[in-house]
Image (cartoon, grey):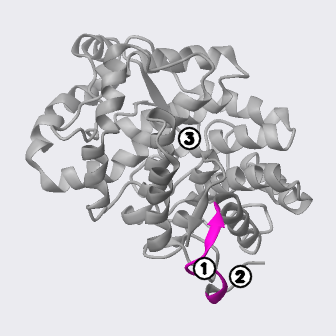
Amino acid sequence: MSKSKSDTEGKTITSYELLERSARAALDIQRGDGSFPPGRNGVYDEPETPVRTTSLWLTTLSKVYEITGDEELAEAANEAADYLLSEEARPHGYTFHSRNAEGKDKCDGLVGQAAPIRGLAWASSSLDRPELGSIAKDIFSIHPFDKQLGLWERIETDGSNISFDRTLNHQIQFAGAAAHLASQFPSIEMLILRFADQLTSKIALRSDGIIRHYVRPSLGPAIRAVGEDPRHWKLLLNPILCRIYTASSRRKRKEVGYHPVNLLALAHIQAKMETPVFQRNHERDLIKRITSADTISSISKSNICCGSMTPGIDIAVALLKFQRAGLNQVTQWIELDLKKKYDTDSSMLSKETMDPEFQAATISHMVDLPNLDLEI
């Protein structure tokens, strides 16, 4: 049972206790089919299915079950996993049905598949259900990977191929989610290593180190891909759009908002791969630049309009993985989110947002952190 605001506000709580309180509070909103209420994709206000929120809560429930051994949490996690295996979640047995936005794909590109892949990977280990990991592997493997471009293509819920996902954070999140399966499946590890090896050639940065929103493909392989299949023609727009949007303050705000999203997913790749990644000098230089104090400090000063729902937590995970940052610095970034977004009455990250269902579920980003003392 969560404590009242008067019992908790201004006091110290551990990150594991915080996760447990949110997980237990989530039991009250879990639905009869094992799913959780869907979000609205943040500021985009698009109708989502329960797939993403259920996947995020599955990750949290699995982690808290590991911590506590409480069978009530295991039962809730199993029901959430079963929902993701249902015909409603995967109506044609291919990719997950993640959104219902008019004129857009139902799979929600690669990003709509990342959360369920990660959730099933966590649950597979925590709940001792190896079939969940195998299903996550199958869904990942449905997506064709172009080894010259180092990019994955999108697959619609009916199995049709939609061409490459041209949004950089989608590609990185997809790889970061699948990295949770790398230790089990060598074929996945090889593809993520290939992706990571080519990543520096696909990332474009602003002068202050903020990652640009679109993939920057190598021109030769991009032309080759379009020549082989004309439906990939939009890939050639990316370099042009990067130039057009350079002077756009609105685009800059969007890229600032997605910078923590990219950092978190890159940290997942770094943490979960058994074969070391980002070891070459130019890769280290890239990581150093995008996690520099000057770059990330600009995020705390920004009014983030879209992208990360929990920028402080996302940055904390990245600093811990890439810079071996001190715990004081890590906790300061986490507390930045908690002070703004944590509701001590509901024990959820549901404050100061137009999408409380989605934001509350992103407490799952804390599962990668050690047990820290935090002030709420």
Q: On the rendered structure, is 252 left or right of 304?
A: left
Is 114 placed left or right of 339 in the picture? right
Question: The C terminus appears in which quarter of the rendering?
Answer: bottom right
The reply to whether residue 155 is visible in this rendering is: no
Task: Name the image quarter holding the N terminus.
Answer: bottom right
- Local packing at callout 2 (Cα closer than 10 Å; few below 14, some 14-19, many 20+) is few
Amino acid type at circle 1 is: Thr
Callout 2 amino acid: Lys
Residue picked out by circle 2:
3
Question: Helix, strand or loop at disc 2?
Answer: loop
Image height check: is 323 above or below 250?
above
Residue occupying the point 61% across, 70% down: 12
- Residue range in magenta is 6-14
Q: Are marks 3 and 1 in contact (CB under 8 Å)?
A: no
- Measured as percent of width and height from the top left, residue 345 is found at 62, 83
Q: Earlier in the sequence, mark 2 or mark 1?
A: 2
The residue where tag 1 is placed is 344
Q: Amino acid at mark 3?
A: Ala
Q: Residues within 10 Å of mark 1 (few under 14, many from 20)?
A: many
| Disc 2 to disc 1: CB gap under 8 Å | yes
Residue 8: in magenta span: yes
Q: Which residue is mark 3?
A: 114
Image coords of residue 263 (percent x, y) = 42, 40
